[in-house]
Image (tube, grey):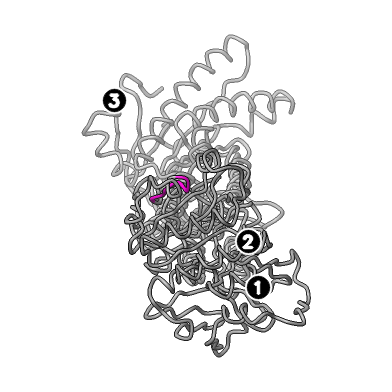
Amino acid sequence: MKKKLLFFLIPFISTSLFIILQLFDPSVIQEKVEGRLYDLRLNVRDNITKKNPPQNILIVYVDEKSIREIGRWPWSRKIMAEFINRVSEGKPKVIGIDIMFSEKENKESDERLARAIKGAGNVVLATAFIVPKERKEVVSPQEVPDFLWDAAFMNVQSVKGIPWKAFAIEPQIVIPPLEEFSEVATLGHVYAHPDMDGILRWEVMYLHFAGDYYPSFPLQIARIARNIEMEDVILYGGSGIMLGDNFIKTDLSGRTVVNYVGEEYSFPFESASDVLKGRTRPEQFKDKIVLIGTSALGTYDMMSTPLSGNMPGVEKNANVVTNILLNNFIKKSPGLLEILYLFLTSVFLGLLLPRLKALPGASLATGLMVFYIVLSFYLLMYGNLWINITYPVSNMLVIFISLTVLKFFFEEKKAKEIRSMFSSYVSPKIVDVLINNPEKAKLGGERKVVTALFSDIAGFTSLSEKRNPEEVVDLLNEYFKEMTGIIFKWDGTLDKFVGDEIMAFWGAPVDQPDHAVRAVRCAMDMIDSLARMQEKWTKEGKDILVCGIGINTGEVLIGNIGAPGKKMDYTIIGDHVNLAARVETLTRKYGAQIILTEFTLDHLETAMKQGTIDHYRIIELETVRVKGKEKEVKIFEMKRVGDEKP
């Protein structure tokens, strides 16, 4: 009962722990362990199902070539104004500039850039918000400029039952573009927070600052590209954003998982110097979503993503814009599938592993883990669904290892019990079979057909009276050692020694269909061995022992019988045992060495026909009524061919 309880308790405790972890999903596990496993799946997907980036998004990089040809970075606002004019000339849908313009240069240059932005009429500027590492009470600035308010969501709604405001990301400081730029452009925040391992997997779709909620830079670009007014965008706090007819689902903090198209430079791109020098024709920008950013070394706008260790920030934004337009962000599983799998596999493994051997058990556990891992790859590759691998697979691993170790411990303990119990009764070969197949060692009572053998020394009482005890014991030990070896040779179970009597049986604890044949062969071997010993004793001038053997086959009650915790014997009891013992006593009356009953002879019939017992004679003695039995039983003498009665 204790053993069964442990086998159920371990899966229950393990599964409960991992369900709790799944529900609370600690950041250290989510970001450092599960995040890496997610990256692996994303990289496999990227290699198997390569995605083609949308051709309506074009990135213009300020790259090494541009700095080499135009001059050191940052460029003058006059150059930037000319740059924007040339892009705008091609009539793109929207221009997203992922470059900060938060400091003044000079009045003339700043005014020229402001005119270029206004002339384009569809420019989105990056706005920096500073979020503290630790969550503190946010002190709002005394005055929030009107141009910043204009960028905030106009329609914010709460979803009943979601305490989203407590989870919203709240910056303490904002660094907007200069007022003259902000008044003629649309603003979007570019705050990005990588996970603990430094990998950027999430996009923050909105921030809470000074009582208002501000959309991200890519969200503003996608909105303008789709000609959607700000008042038509609805923020459902902690749930998602309705952009036209698309609902972009977010977590409680307003984040969503970026579905990266590929590694760096996956999108079509142009060099800024080619645009400025006229090598890139304006027509290439027509009806495109154009993002402008830096990629040159030293511009400090590089990010680590699941597919790239050095992706320009502007390209990360291009990925997010793509996700918004296609509404194909990676969906993070809410955990229901994981909890269901945790529960089902724990029940499955908890019920089956204790009943299976090591290899089938390992195959079962491995199969369930592999199935779940393959499922997680499939769902990410073809359903954009991120399910947690860490908790379900770890739970299966813990259950498998724990139950295997526990099972090994109990089986080792049981093997020791079996070896201790049977090593004195049966041959080492049988003990090994029982240890390898513990289920065969049924220590409780059961009914079974066996063949019992009794062997007794004739005239032992008078012998023991004539000789001193030491001589008698030495003679008996020599005799018992030889006879025991023969019984074990024929895979018999040595029941006990009773004085000078030996009791053995075949057919248990291991099934032996030919138990009667084994018993008879053993009896003939015992007689042959005794004959050799008699010759030896004669030469040594010792007394000679003579024995008789009685054999009977029938159903008996077999089991570990005795006083639990004190004295126990694995033995057989029943009428057929008594019959074998009483048949042995008839060997004196008939002067026979081996006497069989008709029941044993019936079991020898097949062996006799096949000739597997040779050089013998079966002599029917008579039908007798054995003491204690009402029904008469036929008895037979078995002797080797050529043997004669003395």
Quadrant of the image containing the C terminus: top left
Instruction: Report the residue marked by disc 1.
Output: 169
Instruction: Report the residue marked by disc 2.
Output: 193
Q: Indicate whether 132 appears above or below 166.
A: above
Magenta residue span: 268-273
Name the foreground residue: 597 vs 223.
223
Q: Indicate whether 474 appears above or below 269.
A: above
What is the three-letter code of the residue carrying label 2? His
Q: Are marks 1 and 2 in contact (CB under 8 Å)?
A: yes
Q: Position of residue 111 (x, y in %)?
A: 59, 66
Instruction: Report the residue marked by disc 3.
Output: 614
CA distance for labels 3 and 1: 94 Å
Q: Reply yes or no: does residue 271 show up in magenta.
A: yes
CA distance for labels 1 and 2: 10 Å
* Residue in the picture at 64% in, 27% down: 477
Q: Nearer the viewer, mark 3 or mark 1?
A: 1
First reached walking from the N terminus: tag 1 or tag 2: 1
Position of residue 266 in the picture relative to residue 158 (left or right): left
Q: How many neighbours does mark 3 have within 10 angstroms: few (below 14), some (14-19), or many (20 or more)?
A: few
Q: Reply yes or no: does residue 601 show up in magenta.
A: no
What is the three-letter code of the residue carrying label 3? Asp
Q: Position of residue 172 (x, y in %)?
A: 73, 72
First reached walking from the N terminus: tag 2 or tag 3: 2
Q: Indicate whether 484 appears above or below 51.
A: above
Q: How many neighbours does mark 2 have within 10 angstroms: few (below 14), some (14-19), or many (20 or more)?
A: some
Q: Position of residue 616 (x, y in %)?
A: 31, 26
* Residue in the picture at 54% in, 86% down: 154
Q: Secondary structure at mark 3?
A: loop
Position of residue 502 in the picture relative to residue 375 (left or right): right
Q: Are marks 2 and 3 in contact (CB under 8 Å)?
A: no
Q: Nearer the viewer, mark 2 or mark 3?
A: 2
Q: Residue furthest bottom?
A: 160
